[in-house]
Image (spheres, rainbow, N blue to C red):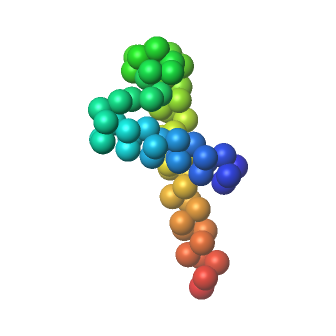
């Protein structure tokens, strides 16, 4: 699960980088616009993956103690 979450978070980071630097939303372009069902699913999965990655930080901190 950690690997999947990191991959999805990386996809989200690349997409937001493209939005910030080039005003280009790759996910929307691939899946037919920001409001397309598939785009919204990808956005939701990336958001959930980001939340999961927060748990990775907490687990790493707990393992160091």
Q: Nearer the viewer, residue 61 or 46?
A: 46
Residue 63 in picture, x, y percent from top left: 64, 78
Question: Exactly how many numbered labels are in the figure?
Answer: 0
Q: Is residue 23 visible?
A: yes
Q: Is residue 40 visible?
A: no
Q: Nearer the viewer, residue 45 or 16?
A: 16
Q: Is residue 41 left or right of residue 19?
A: right
State the image quarter where residue 28 is shown.
top left
Does 14 appear above or below 44?
below
Q: Residue at x 45, y 46 (%)?
A: 13
Residue 31 in picture, x, y percent from top left: 51, 18
Q: Residue at x 46, y 43 (%)?
A: 14
Residue 18 in picture, x, y percent from top left: 38, 38
Q: Nearer the viewer, residue 41 or 55?
A: 41
Task: In the displayed orientation, state which residue is furthest to the front.
Answer: 22
Does 38 appear above or below 27?
above
Q: Is residue 42 left or right of residue 21?
A: right
Residue 37 in picture, x, y percent from top left: 50, 16
Q: Is residue 29 left or right of residue 65?
A: left
């Amino acid at each position: 699960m950690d690997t999947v979450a990191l991959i999805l978070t990386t996809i989200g980071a690349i997409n937001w980088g493209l939005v910030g630097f080039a005003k280009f939303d790759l996910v929307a372009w691939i899946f037919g616009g920001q409001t397309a069902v598939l785009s919204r699913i990808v956005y939701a999965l990336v958001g959930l993956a980001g939340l999961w990655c927060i748990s990775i930080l907490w687990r790493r901190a707990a393992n160091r103690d």
